[in-house]
C-alpha cells in the first residue's frame, strides 16, 4: 500500500472519529438539557481524568499504565459514531446483548479500514468492555465519574432533573476497585451537597 492510499484510509477513519463531535450525549437531552455536550466533549474529559487518576494510582503502587489507559479512554466511545449515544431510558427497551452486538459491529466497521492498527484499537476496546485489566477498571470508573461531574456542572447551571444519574447503580459499579476512585466519588457527592443538590430519596 502506498502512502496516498494509506492516507485515504486514515481520512476515511477520521470521518467517523470526527462525527463524535456532532453526536450529543442523549441522556442529557432526555432530561431537558437543550444543548448538551457532545460524545467527543465527554471523551476528552474522560481521557484527561483517566491519565491523572492512573498516574496517581501508579505512584501508589497499582499496576496501571496511564498511557495505555488514556488511549483506551480516547477510543472507548468510537462505536457511537455509527449508532449514536443510546441513553439509559432507551436501554430499558433494548436487550443489553443486542446493544453490545450492535456497538461492537459498528466499532469493527469503523476501525476495519486501519488494518493491524485497527486490531490494536479493538484489543483496547475489548479490554474496556470486559474490565480485563487495571487500565480498563480506571477508564470504566473515569467514564462514570466524568458523567457525574458533568451532571453536577449542569445542576450548578440550574437543571433540577438529573437525580436519576445519581440513583443509577450501574453508574457506581466501578468506584470500589481502588480507594482513590471511591474517594473521588465521595468528594463529588460532598461537593454536590455543598451546592444544595442533596439526594431527595
Image: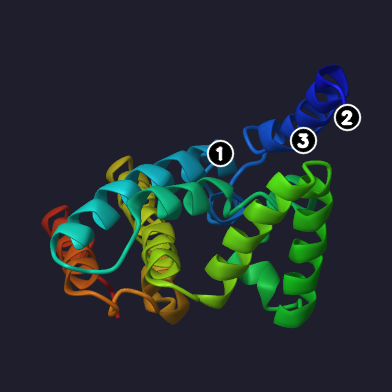
The crowding category of the residue bearing disc 1, from other C-alpha atoms within 10 Å (few below 14, some 14 to 19, many at least 20), is many
Residue at numbered disc 2: 1
Q: CA distance from mark 3 to mark 2?
A: 16 Å
Task: State the image quarter where residue 117 is shown.
Answer: top right
Q: CA distance from mark 1 to mark 3?
A: 15 Å
Q: Check residue 89 in the rendering and tell me which mark sits there, or answer none.
A: none
Q: Is residue 142 left or right of residue 105?
A: left
Q: In this rendering, does residue 6 appear at all?
A: yes
Q: Earlier in the sequence, mark 3 or mark 2?
A: 2
- Identify the residue at image location x=79%, y=56%: 108
Q: Is residue 151 left or right of residue 191?
A: right
Q: Position of residue 49 (x, y in %)?
A: 32, 48
Q: Earlier in the sequence, mark 1 or mark 3?
A: 3
Classify 117 as above or below 188.
Answer: above
Q: Secondary structure at mark 1?
A: helix
- Quadrant of the image for the C terminus? bottom left
Residue pushed farthest top? Answer: 4
The residue mark sitting in front, 3 or 2, is: 2
Classify 159 as above or below 128.
Answer: above
Residue at numbered disc 1: 40
Q: Secondary structure at mark 3?
A: helix
Residue pushed farthest front? Answer: 1
- Identify the residue at image location x=29%, y=78%: 177
Residue at numbered disc 3: 13
Amino acid at each position: 500500500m502506498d502512502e496516498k492510499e494509506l492516507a485515504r484510509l486514515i481520512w476515511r477513519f477520521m470521518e467517523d472519529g470526527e462525527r463524535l463531535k456532532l453526536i450529543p450525549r442523549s441522556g442529557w437531552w432526555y432530561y431537558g438539557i437543550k444543548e448538551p455536550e457532545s460524545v467527543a466533549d465527554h471523551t476528552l474529559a474522560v481521557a484527561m481524568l483517566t491519565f491523572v487518576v492512573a498516574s496517581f494510582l501508579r505512584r501508589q503502587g497499582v499496576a496501571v499504565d496511564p498511557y495505555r489507559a488514556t488511549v483506551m479512554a480516547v477510543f472507548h466511545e468510537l462505536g457511537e459514531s455509527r449508532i449514536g449515544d443510546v441513553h439509559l431510558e432507551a436501554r430499558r427497551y433494548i436487550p443489553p446483548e443486542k446493544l453490545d452486538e450492535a456497538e461492537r459491529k459498528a466499532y469493527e466497521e469503523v476501525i476495519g479500514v486501519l488494518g493491524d492498527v485497527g486490531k490494536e484499537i479493538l484489543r483496547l476496546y475489548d479490554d474496556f468492555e470486559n474490565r480485563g485489566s487495571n487500565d480498563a477498571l480506571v477508564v470504566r470508573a473515569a467514564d462514570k465519574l466524568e458523567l457525574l461531574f458533568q451532571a453536577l456542572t449542569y445542576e450548578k447551571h440550574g437543571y433540577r432533573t438529573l437525580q436519576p444519574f445519581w440513583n443509577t447503580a450501574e453508574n457506581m459499579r466501578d468506584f470500589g476497585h481502588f480507594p482513590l476512585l471511591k474517594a473521588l466519588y465521595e468528594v463529588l457527592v460532598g461537593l454536590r451537597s455543598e451546592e444544595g443538590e442533596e439526594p431527595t430519596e
